[in-house]
Every structure is written in C-alpha cells, then in structure tokens.
Image (cartoon, rainbow, N blue to C red):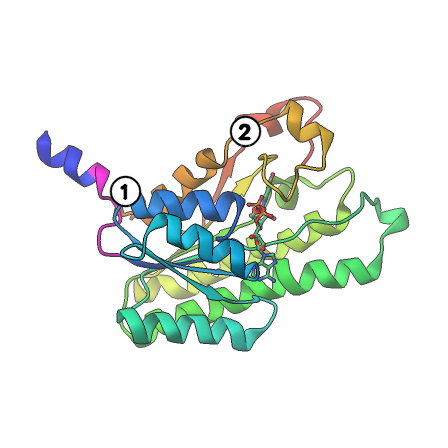
Amino acid sequence: MAQVTALSILKLAGKISIITGGASGIGEATARLFATNGAFIVLADIQDELGQKVAESIGSQHCTYIHCDISNENDVISVINFTVKTYGRLNIMFSNAGIISTSNQTVLDLDLAQFDKLFAINARGTVACVKHAARAMVEHNIRGVIICTTSVGASKGASTRTDYAMSKHPVLGLVRSASKQLGVYGIRVNCVSPSFVVTPLLNRYEETKKRKKRVEDVAQAVVFLASDASSFITGHDLVVDGGLTKLPDADD
Ligand code: NAD
C-alpha cells in the first residue's frame, strides 16, 4: 500500500518535459502539477517576463523558461535541441500553446486573415512541436509521450468562432495519424479537449463565468496521459468538460 502511494505521488519522477504555452492558464497549471509529480519542465512561451516568473516560482530544480514561438519552426527546433543537450533527453512534449479568435464569426463572415493566424499557431505550430519532439525521441531511443491541447469545438463544431474550431480540428488528425506511426517506437500520442476553462484566453467571454471550470481539471488529465498510468492509451482524445458537451445547448 505504501508503495502504491509513493508511485501515485511521483508519477513523473525524473521525466524531462517541454510545455508550450506554459506561461499562463492550462500550461502553467500543468507545469506546476508536473513539478509536484517529480518532472523537470522546460517552459516554452512568447510571454518571456511572465514565463520566467512562473519558472522561478516553480523553482529552478524543477523548471526553466525558454522563449519559443511555435509558429516559427526554428524556435521549436531550438527548444527541443536545448532540452536534449542540457538534460540529456525529452520524455514528454505537452504541445499546448494556442490562441483564440478575436471575434465571434460564423462561416458567413469569416475573417480569412484571422483564419491564417489561427492556423499558423494552433495547427501548423502544433505540427512543428509534434514533429520535432517525435524526431528527438526516436533519435535518442526514448519511449516518450506526446500530448496536444485541442478543444471540444474541434470534434463537435462551434456555433461561433468557426475559425478557432477549424484550427483545432487538424490536431485531432495529427494525433490519430502520429499515434499510428509512432507506436512502433513506443511513443504514445494523445490529446486533451477542454471546453470552457477560465484562463486569460477566455476571460473576455461572459459565458465562461457561467460555466466555470478549473485549469487543474485539465492539468490532472494531462498528468494521467503523461504518466505510465495511461501506458496502454494512445491516439485518444480525452474530453475534459465536466459533461458540458452532453448538455442540450452544448457549444465549444
Ligand atoms: P492562455 O492564454 O492562458 O495560455 C496560452 C499560452 O500560449 C499563453 O501563455 C500564450 O502566451 C501562449 N502562446 C500563444 N501563442 C503562442 C505561440 N505562438 N508560441 C508559444 N506560445 C504561445 O490560454 P489557455 O486557456 O491556457 O490555452 C491553452 C490551450 O488550451 C490553447 O491551445 C487553447 O486553445 C486550449 N483551450 C482552452 C480552452 C479554455 O476554455 N481556456 C478551451 C479549449 C481549448
């Protein structure tokens, strides 16, 4: 019994991880929970001051911050090279960074410039993170774990923010394809699909106040997918929505 307790407390002991979008919201909460579970985290974000503050508050024995704009493939390569060179390996990639539409749009009034921006970060940026994390794991013979953040809007569709829901949909295709291709290397690939969680990303929306959920709920799901507790799970989209999408008026 004592052994079970110790294992459950240190689920990620000794694991080297990268969390993109780690300066805020779901990424920050996950970084804190990873540290509590014994992992080392390379926190990657574009908000340098905030990211450094978060890393300092987690503590240098568990966390370091590095600038990385995931829409720039060279930044992604740099953060992965830095991690492998400094810590010897990459065990876990949590590709979580993302942005939301700045306005609600149906398909009738889609802003294609905003569409391109969302795809550059949410879709293409996530692909770059998964691609280069997987290459580092394969190259160093690491049976690693890759987790992406998508959204319930990706699988359910959205009645507004069409571009956002669309930009998260490729992540599902990526996770399903990569899990098929990387299983042979012992690498698992899954995603989490949160619904509304109160973070700076969504604070501006009134509805989030009504449907308040905690970032920790998503972080716990990510720890589960990152740990050996989920060692038989790959290619899965773990919906973390407290049942919201099961309601009759369900949206993203
Ligand atoms: P957040 O705004 O608190 O955090 C997102 C982080 O990503 C920020 O720190 C931001 O600086 C960073 N980021 C943005 N663009 C980046 C880039 N190009 N390169 C690197 N970092 C970048 O928001 P959050 O709610 O924690 O969002 C995390 C993820 O969860 C996102 O992918 C988001 O789409 C997804 N999501 C959030 C919700 C929600 O309700 N909050 C719901 C579904 C999905």
Q: Is residue 179 left or right of residue 210?
A: left
- Secondary structure type for disc 2: loop
Q: How many marks?
A: 2
What amino acid type should be assigned to the residue bearing mark 2? Lys
Q: To which residue does mark 2 refer?
A: 213
Q: Is residue 75 above or below residue 7?
A: below
Q: Magenta stretch containing residue 13, yes or no?
A: yes
Q: Is residue 88 left or right of residue 233?
A: left
Quarter-of-image position of residue 15: bottom left
Q: Which residue is drawn at the image coordinates 63% and 52% (left, top)? A: 168
Question: Is the shortest distance between ligand 1 and the CB of mark 2 under 8 Å?
Answer: yes
- Percent x, y of residue 89: 29, 69
Residues drawn in magenta = 8-15
Q: Nearer the viewer, mark 2 or mark 1?
A: 2
Image quadrant holding the C terminus, namely: top right
The reply to whether residue 20 is visible in this rendering is no
- Of residue 32 and residue 105, the one placed in the foreground of this image is 32
Rate crowding at label 1 as few (under 14), some (14 to 19) or many (20 or more) other CA atoms within 10 Å: few
In this view, the residue farthest toward the left is: 2
Q: Magenta stretch containing residue 130, yes or no?
A: no
Q: Which mark, residue 229?
A: 1
Q: Which residue is drawn at the image coordinates 50% and 31% (left, top)? A: 214
Q: Which residue is drawn at the image coordinates 18% and 40% (left, top)? A: 7
Q: CA distance from mark 2 to mark 1?
A: 24 Å
In this view, the residue farthest toward the right is: 108
- Of residue 248 and residue 44, the one placed in the foreground of this image is 44
2 or 1: tag closer to the N-terminus: 2
What amino acid type should be assigned to the residue bearing mark 1? Ala
